[in-house]
Amino acid sequence: MFQKPDIGGGVSDFWSYIREPKPHRWAIWGVALAITWLVFNGVEKYLIPVEEPKAQIIYFENWTANRGDAEARADWVERAKEETRRNAKKRAEYQRFADSLGIEYDSTEADKVTRETLGEEEAAAAKKKPEPAQLRSTLAERAARGPQPAPQTQR
């Protein structure tokens, strides 16, 4: 039965049925489309409510009135250096990921800016891979510690 589906025959049958003159054809089409629109609109508005974002008041840091330009610049420079550190760490993660996939990833220009901004030592520290957190000791570490005394149970 399903060995050779006749798509063209099904489409032509549907088209000939649609073209048959029926007295209330357009009214039925209109009602069907209106009901479909009402159902989808109702689902959108009432079953899946979307909360409108509320107005937020965002406070910022207040500075003293006698704050000088040098102090403001020092704060700005420190924030810029912190952003550069975060970018350098993220770039190092992307570099390691690209290396593991065998993809060429060139970050020499960005690394140059990082070295100019932070200095050589801090830029190298930002590129350094973080040590993984050791949750459990390995079998070799436990063997190196030797046998542990059994815990005393109270009777």
Image (cartoon, grey):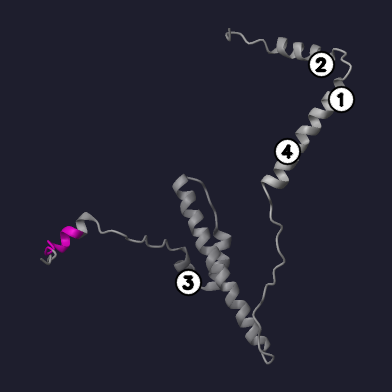
Disc 3: which residue:
122
- Are the two marked residues, 4 and 3, in contact with CB atoms closer than 8 angstroms? no
Within 10 Å of disc 1 (Cα), the crowding (few <14, some 14-19, many 20+) is few
Above or below — where is 151 with respect to 22?
A: below
Nearer to the camera, 117 or 94: 94
Horizontal side, residue 81 vs residue 46: left or right:
left
Disc nearer the start of the sequence (1/4): 1
Query: SS of the residue at dot 1?
Result: helix
Disc 2: which residue:
18
Q: Residue at x 67, y 47 (%)?
A: 48
Q: Quadrant of the N terminus?
A: top right
Q: CA distance from mark 1 to mark 4?
A: 20 Å
Q: Which amino acid, by three-letter code, is at mark 1?
A: Ala
Query: SS of the residue at dot 4?
Result: helix
Image quadrant assignment for residue 5: top right
Task: Determine the residue located farthest toward the bottom in the rendered image.
Answer: 66
- Are the two marked residues, 1 and 4, in contact with CB atoms closer than 8 angstroms? no
Above or below — where is 3 with respect to 23?
A: above
Residue 129 at x, y = what percent? 42, 61
Q: CA distance from mark 3 to mark 1?
A: 75 Å
Q: CA distance from mark 2 to mark 3?
A: 74 Å
Label disc, if present, on residue 40 of the rendered structure: 4
